[in-house]
Structures are given as structure tokens and as C-alpha cells.
């Protein structure tokens, strides 16, 4: 077990109120909310009045009130002489007597003077929640190495709801010292924003959907936003066996600027591959479809091949092979730029238990002996989200059928090679094609999981949402608000959803105003589209229903953010084998709230961790953030994240403070948005976050916190080495005895369909399945009672 996050404060509230002060308290000025900002008033236990020691981890440290002051006679020096992990910090005492009162929704400008002998020092905030008590809030700014007194200023994010007080100070998390003095804190004046609506009242409240005039020319189920603003749409064979047999594999590049598509030669069937952007903006595509199922024989097969797509040349090039086949693999980029992958189906249709690691430094997949292995089967497209300390959180979102054994979610520690089960995920075996997303901002370390179903048992998809706070010592999911209900088309036109009807195939998209758009879905396995869209507010944990995508967006659909702040949706592949090639674009309400702020310049687009980067804007902004571009398929994009950039504001010049922790923002190209106080975002600028190739003494290292350090779930160590996990050939929920391979007759019909030939055939007719050939002699669903080789023919429906 790792050490606790915080040490006990040495100065208690009782001591403050019992006459132990050595001198009269130094009050806060009218403008400055901090008491004893220059440490001039002494307190107990060697600390100044209203300041306390804090920190965690294995390190040697000293706290000293020094005469080497910026002004006055005293300053505070925190020094680490040995460090294995953790930090030390002098904080404003967490008490009603000392901690400044703050107002939810407001922002505060913080300032101090400092000298440092280490680059590993940062301004750290804690907040007092009126329900949960004191807790870590965020790191705001990494302090540049400074031998002389230097001023640092930074603006807080908006104070979260339920917060009444704030504490802050400087964390030292590397060997060396930080000496600080003359702290300031004042509330940012409210901006004067006249209410303005530039659209209809409905558009200003709910946004607007448009179906684009040009269809997607390929049957794409993979959508990757590129660092030039274009979108790579990968289809491979497009779930069409005739295309596979012909060797016709396709991709397209869509340009939102002019609405054009360019067909891209595609060397392999990348249908149901994995993909992620590398740190240089190229796209790593891993595995895909080696073979379609054979009725009565093998299931889908995944190949070992891997490719890289170059946005500049718009071409694919081959990498070395993976160690195993992986149809439906995960793909997560790590803080060092490496990519880790789990799960999927092997070349023989069994489940892969081989973890794979693509080395950023070597630009190749690592041999098996270089990769830690648990020999666990993680399933298909397991959602593996990178945590702030480099561990991976499996959220429970997956594709096809039941979840993994145990609680259905877990924390995987690659270094220790252990998996710890995490409790609280409800109905864990009905989270098939749910969506999971790291909520804004990434610094908060909260994950939202929405909806889901089960293509095998085929119940009504659910409305469940579950939220987990990975900052807690023992994280556990807690129930969130239910997904709002919309309408569902059961074959005879949309009708209101009833009971607990929800949706699977749900998409979740991070938006630049800090909210999450959820859209699309269906009630059952590749059937019964649900028309519902809403916006989730992480601050209030509530949904706001908005305008609905007019197109069905079920299996093989995607939704993703464009650099102009709109959301694009593509695809739908119901069980009858058809494909919706219409494309929709959503303009959120923030695009109807008057003029947008504009980033007029970005001084440098090459960013390092711990940097301060300057931009200029045409009018005041309230926040800025980096959003990692989408690489989404099958409701899964575990790399999607929104990283807050605390501001230091001087008129139209805004300095953005970049996190020092690459696990919060893995290297790569990001969309930079500036957002005003009304939540209206700019059009994004592209910046490249990569970090130095070799760390130097002046470069800050990652400030990692000891979150999730006391999990009580079952710890699973690596199992016995094995080759694979046996899986059912009907893993896709389709009975291959009927129709062509791209048609999916469900192995289990929805519960309301009676288990009779007539009822099943009527359901298939209502869902436009057309003529279905029976493959072979077996008829497990009883659809060919006449034994003429055609399911649901006229003779099959005659009463006998």
C-alpha cells in the first residue's frame, strides 16, 4: 500500500483559537483574500499563522521560515533533500479561520513571488466541498526555475458547485527547494456579456442538426480526426463479404472545409481494427479482419498486420507485425508515446490473451518477451483509459456479450503487472457497446459510463450511467442520472420510449465548453434505433435533452468533434445488412450565442510539458483547453480527453499553463480552444505537445498524485502462460445459419417477440431483412419449417 496523500496539518484550528499566536495576526487586505500573505505573523509548531505543512510519499524534507524574503522579514522555504515519490507543500490552513471563502462559478487570480532550485514545483489547489470536506482540486502552474525573486500569476478555473473555501500553495516534487512570499488572491470581476441569440429560440436552447448533401462514399466504422482538420474514415471491406472476396478495401479522407471526400487506397481489410494517433500525428492502425465467419465453422479472424497512415501523404505504410491477431483490439497511448493494446480475436477465432506494446522510440511492435503479460482475456474493444499515474482504468465498456469476470471494471498496473477489481458498475454484463469517457477536465480524473446492452441475451438496452472518481483512495462507481429517453423505431415509426428502455451503441463526445454530448443508439442488437441526444454537465451531473439527430445511428456509427466546434456523426449498420451513408452535423447551442472569441495568434505551436505558452485573443476569455482529436469506433475512444490550461491574463495576452504530467495529456497534436464566460468557444488552433527528447535540469518532471492508492478490490496477478481464450463462434450475436455474412439474424430475439416462426418472421419482415437463404441443413431458430432452404417463406408461415 502506498503512503497516504496528505500528512496531518501541524497547526490545528484549536491552536488558532486558543491564544497560541506569538504575535497579532496579519490580516488580509481589502483586495487580498489571504490572511498572513507574507508569513510575517508567527503561529504554532514553527509554521506561520494560517499556514500548514502538507504532502505525502517517501522523501526527506524541511519547512523553514527564512529571512531571505521578497518583502518584509520572512518567507517560506520548502526543500526536499531526497525523493523517491510524493511531494511537500506549505498550504493555507484548511480551516474556517484561515481558508479564503470562495463563490461557486467565480474565478480567482492568484499570485506569489518565488525562488527555486528545482524545476519540479507547482501551484496546487485544494477546495472544501460542503458535503465531502477538503479535497484536492488541481495543479495550476509549474514554476520556472528561478534564482532571483520572480512573480507568478495564474487564474483558477470556475469554482465547482458545492465549494465554499479554498486552500493553495506551492508543491515541491523534486529534490531542491522553493522559497515563496507575498501571496495574493482576488476575485475576477464578472464579465459583461449581453445576452444574445443569433438563431431561433429553439436553436439557442437545443442546437441544430443538418444532414449534409454529400453522402459518405465508404462504409466506414472508424473515424479519426487528423491534425490538419480532416477526418480519416476507414471502412476496409465495410462489413461486406463480397468486398472482402474481391479484395476491395476502402478508406476516405473527408475535408470539413469544403465538404469533399478523397478515396484512399487501403492495403488490407481494416474492418474492425484498432487505431490511435501517434505523437507526430500519424495514425497507427492495428489488426483487422483476416476472414469472415463460416456457418458451422470458425468465427471472425484477426490478422497480425499493422499499418501507419500519414496525413501529409495520405498513404498507408506497413509496420512490423504484432505478436498475435487482434480483431476488435483496444488502443491506448501512454504518457511516453508508446501504445498498448489488449483483447480481440486471433487468427484462429479464439480470444487473444496477448498484450501488445508499440514503442514510440523504436517505431515498432515489441517482441513478446519485452511486454508484460497477464495472460488475461480482456474481450473486444475493452475501454482502457490512461490514469494520471500511468495505470490503466478498464471502465467496463466493451463490445459483444458479457463483460469480463469479477466486478466488470478494474485498474491495471503495467509496472507491477497486477489487476485490481473496482466495484460499483451496475449490470456489468449489460454494458456491451456502452460509452465511457474521461470527464472534463482530465485533471479531475472522473469517468462516466453510459448505457449498454448485450447482443447475446438481447434485453432492452439500459439507461444506466455510472461515475467513478479516480482521485479517491478506494475508487468505486456510483450511480449517475439516467440517460433521458427519446423515441424508438420498432419497425413502424418512432414512438416514445417507455419503462427503463435506454440504448446501446451510444456515442459520447467531449465539447469545448466542458460538457459531453451523448447521441445515437439502438434498443436491441442491430435493431430498433433510438432517437435521443442530450448534453451532460459534469459540474451538476445532469442531462439536458437537445435537438435529435434525424438519422438512425446504431451499430457501426461514430460521433466526433470537429475543430470548428461542431459534432459530426456517421454510419448505421442494422441487422438486415444495409448501411446508412448519410452524414449529420450538429451545431451545439454555444454556436448560437453571439460572436465567437478568436485566437488571433499562437506564439509557438510546439509545446513541452510544464511550459507557459502565450496566445493572443480578440476579447476576454474564461478558460482554454486542449482536446485530443477523436479516434473512435464501436462507441469506444479511450484516448479522448479535455485538458484544462489555467490562464495568466494580461489584457489580450493570455499565458496558458501546460500540465507537467504527460499521463494527463499524452504526447501528440491537440485542438486548442479558447472559451468565453458564456461558454462560447473559438475555432480550434492546432498545437503539438511532445515534451523534450531528453530531460534537462531545467525541465519539469510530472507532478503525479497518490490517487487511488488504497483500493480494496481483489488483486489478480498474472495467470499461467497460455495461448488463447476459447470464445463462441456466435460472438457477434448473429446466427450465421441464415442469410449472407453481412446480415445478422439475432441469436436471441427481443423479449417481446414470441418464440414462434410467425412472430420471428414478422419481426424480420418489419426490420427489412428480405429473402434469407438457409446455410446448411440446420435451422436452430425454426425459420424454415418447409425445409426448402429459404427462411420465412410462404410455406413456413402456414399453420400446421
Image: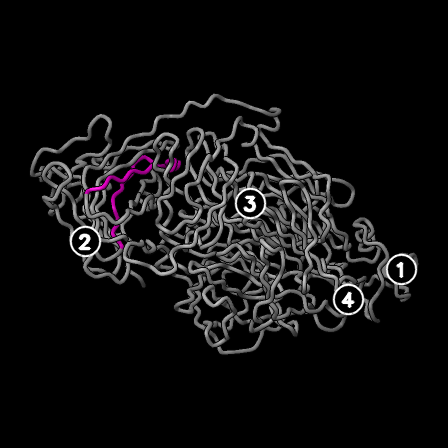
Q: Are discs 2 and 4 less than 8 Å apart at CB? A: no
Viewed as shown, does residue 781 lie left or right of 505?
right
Q: Are discs 3 and 4 less than 8 Å apart at CB? A: no
**Majority secondary structure in the magenta region:** strand
Instruction: Decide: is 642 above or below 349.
Output: above
Instruction: Decide: is 199 above or below 16.
Output: above
In which quadrant of the rendered image does the C terminus lie? bottom right
163 part of magenta stretch:
yes
Q: Can you tell which quarter of the image residue 343 is in? A: bottom right
In which quadrant of the rendered image does the N terminus lie? bottom left
Residue in the picture at 23% in, 47% down: 146
743 part of magenta stretch:
no
Mark 4 Cα shell of 10 Å, populated few (<14), some (14-19), many (≥20): few
Q: Which residue is mark 4?
A: 245
The first of marks 4 and 1 along the sequence is 4
The first of marks 2 and 4 along the sequence is 2
How far apart are labels 2 and 4 at the CA level? 67 Å
Q: Which residue is mark 2?
A: 79
Q: Which residue is mark 3?
A: 509
- The stretch in magenta equals 149-173
* Secondary element type, mark 1: helix
Question: Mark 3 or 1, which is nearer the eye?
Answer: 3
Amino acid at each position: 500500500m502506498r503512503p497516504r496523500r496528505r500528512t496531518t496539518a501541524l497547526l490545528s484550528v484549536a491552536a488558532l483559537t486558543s491564544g497560541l499566536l506569538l504575535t497579532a495576526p496579519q490580516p488580509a487586505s481589502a483586495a487580498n483574500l489571504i490572511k498572513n500573505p507574507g508569513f510575517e505573523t508567527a503561529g504554532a509548531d514553527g509554521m506561520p499563522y494560517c499556514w500548514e505543512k502538507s504532502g505525502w510519499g517517501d522523501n526527506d524534507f524541511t519547512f523553514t521560515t527564512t529571512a531571505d524574503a521578497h518583502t518584509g522579514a520572512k518567507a517560506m522555504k520548502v526543500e526536499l533533500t531526497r525523493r523517491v515519490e510524493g511531494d511537500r507543500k506549505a498550504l493555507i490552513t484548511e480551516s474556517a479561520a484561515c481558508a479564503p471563502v470562495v463563490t461557486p462559478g467565480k474565478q480567482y487570480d492568484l499570485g506569489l513571488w518565488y525562488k527555486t532550485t528545482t524545476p519540479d514545483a507547482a501551484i496546487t489547489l485544494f477546495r472544501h466541498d460542503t458535503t465531502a470536506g477538503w479535497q484536492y482540486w488541481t495543479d495550476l502552474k509549474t514554476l520556472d526555475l528561478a534564482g532571483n525573486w520572480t512573480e507568478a500569476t495564474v487564474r483558477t478555473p470556475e469554482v465547482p458547485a458545492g465549494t465554499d473555501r479554498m486552500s493553495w500553495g506551492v508543491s515541491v516534487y523534486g529534490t531542491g527547494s522553493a522559497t515563496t512570499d507575498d501571496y495574493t488572491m482576488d476575485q475576477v470581476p464578472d464579465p459583461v456579456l449581453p445576452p444574445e441569440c443569433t438563431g431561433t429560440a429553439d436553436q439557442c436552447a437545443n442546437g441544430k442538426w443538418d444532414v449534409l448533401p454529400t453522402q459518405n462514399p465508404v462504409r466506414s466504422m472508424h473515424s479519426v480526426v487528423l491534425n490538419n482538420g480532416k477526418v480519416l474514415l476507414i471502412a476496409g471491406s465495410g462489413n461486406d463479404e463480397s468486398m472482402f472476396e474481391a479484395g476491395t478495401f476502402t478508406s476516405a479522407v473527408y475535408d470539413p472545409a469544403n465538404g469533399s471526400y478523397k478515396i484512399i487506397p487501403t492495403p488490407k481489410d481494416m474492418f474492425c481494427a484498432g487505431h490511435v494517433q501517434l505523437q507526430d500525428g500519424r495514425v497507427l492502425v492495428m489488426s483487422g479482419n483476416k476472414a469472415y465467419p463460416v456457418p458451422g465453422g470458425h468465427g471472425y479472424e484477426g490478422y497480425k498486420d499493422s499499418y501507419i497512415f500519414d496525413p501529409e501523404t495520405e498513404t498507408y505504410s506497413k509496420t512490423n507485425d504484432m505478436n498475435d491477431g487482434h480483431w476488435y483490439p483496444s488502443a491506448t497511448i501512454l504518457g511516453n508515446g508508446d501504445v498498448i493494446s489488449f483483447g480481440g480475436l486471433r487468427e484462429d477465432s479464439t480470444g487473444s490473451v496477448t498484450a501488445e506494446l508499440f514503442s514510440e522510440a523504436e517505431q515498432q511492435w515489441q517482441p513478446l518477451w519485452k511486454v508484460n503479460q497477464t495472460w488475461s482475456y480482456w474481450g473486444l474493444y475493452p475501454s482502457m483509459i490512461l490514469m494520471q499515474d500511468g495505470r490503466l482504468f478498464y471502465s467496463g465498456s466493451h463490445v459483444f456479450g458479457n463483460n469480463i469476470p469479477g466486478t466488470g471494471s478494474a485498474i491495471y498496473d503495467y509496472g507491477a503487472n497486477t489487476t485490481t477489481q473496482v466495484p460499483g458498475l451496475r449490470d456489468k454484463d449489460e454494458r456491451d457497446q456502452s460509452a465511457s469517457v474521461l470527464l472534463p477536465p482530465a485533471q479531475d480524473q472522473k469517468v462516466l459510463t453510459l448505457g449498454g446492452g448485450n447482443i447475446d441475451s438481447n434485453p432492452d438496452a439500459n439507461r444506466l450511467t455510472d461515475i467513478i472518481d479516480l482521485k479517491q483512495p478506494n475508487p468505486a462507481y456510483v450511480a449517475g442520472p439516467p440517460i433521458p429517453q427519446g423515441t424508438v423505431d420498432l419497425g413502424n415509426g418512432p414512438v416514445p420510449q417507455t419503462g427503463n428502455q435506454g440504448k446501446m451503441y451510444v456515442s459520447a463526445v467531449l465539447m469545448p465548453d466542458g460538457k459531453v454530448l451523448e447521441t445515437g443508439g439502438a434498443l436491441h442488437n442491430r435493431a430498433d434505433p433510438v432517437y435521443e441526444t442530450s448534453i451532460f454537465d459534469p459540474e451538476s451531473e445532469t442531462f439536458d435533452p437537445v435537438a435529435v439527430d434525424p438519422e438512425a445511428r446504431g451499430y457501426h456509427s461514430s460521433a466526433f468533434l470537429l475543430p470548428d466546434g461542431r459534432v459530426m456523426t456517421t454510419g448505421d449498420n442494422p441487422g438486415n445488412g444495409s448501411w446508412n451513408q448519410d452524414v449529420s452535423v450538429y451545431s451545439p447551442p454555444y454556436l448560437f450565442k453571439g460572436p465567437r472569441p478568436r485566437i488571433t495568434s499562437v506564439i509557438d505551436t510546439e509545446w513541452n510539458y510544464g511550459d507557459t505558452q502565450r496566445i493572443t485573443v480578440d476579447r476576454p476569455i474564461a478558460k482554454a483547453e486542449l482536446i485530443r482529436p477523436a479516434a473512435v469506433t464501436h462507441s469506444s475512444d479511450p484516448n479522448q480527453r479535455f485538458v484544462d490550461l489555467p490562464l495568466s491574463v494580461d489584457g489580450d495576452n493570455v499565458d496558458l499553463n501546460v500540465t507537467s504530467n504527460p499521463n494527463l495529456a499524452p504526447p501528440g497534436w491537440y485542438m486548442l480552444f479558447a472559451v468565453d464566460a458564456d461558454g462560447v468557444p473559438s475555432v480550434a488552433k492546432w498545437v503539438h505537445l511532445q515534451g523534450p527528447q531528453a530531460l534537462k535540469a531545467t525541465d519539469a518532471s510530472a507532478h503525479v498524485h497518490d490517487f487511488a492508492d488504497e483500493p480494496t478490490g481483489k488483486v489478480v496477478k498474472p495467470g499461467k502462460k497460455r495461448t488463447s481464450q476459447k470464445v463462441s463462434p456466435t460472438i457477434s450475436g448473429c446466427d450465421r445459419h441464415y442469410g449472407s455474412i453481412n446480415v445478422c439474424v439475432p441469436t436471441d430475439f427481443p423479449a417481446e417477440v414470441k418464440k414462434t416462426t410467425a412472430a420471428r418472421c414478422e419481426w424480420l419482415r418489419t426490420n427489412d431483412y428480405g429473402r434469407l437463404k438457409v446455410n446448411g441443413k440446420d435451422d436452430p431458430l425454426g425459420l424454415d419449417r418447409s425445409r426448402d432452404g429459404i427462411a420465412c417463406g410462404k410455406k413456413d408461415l402456414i399453420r400446421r
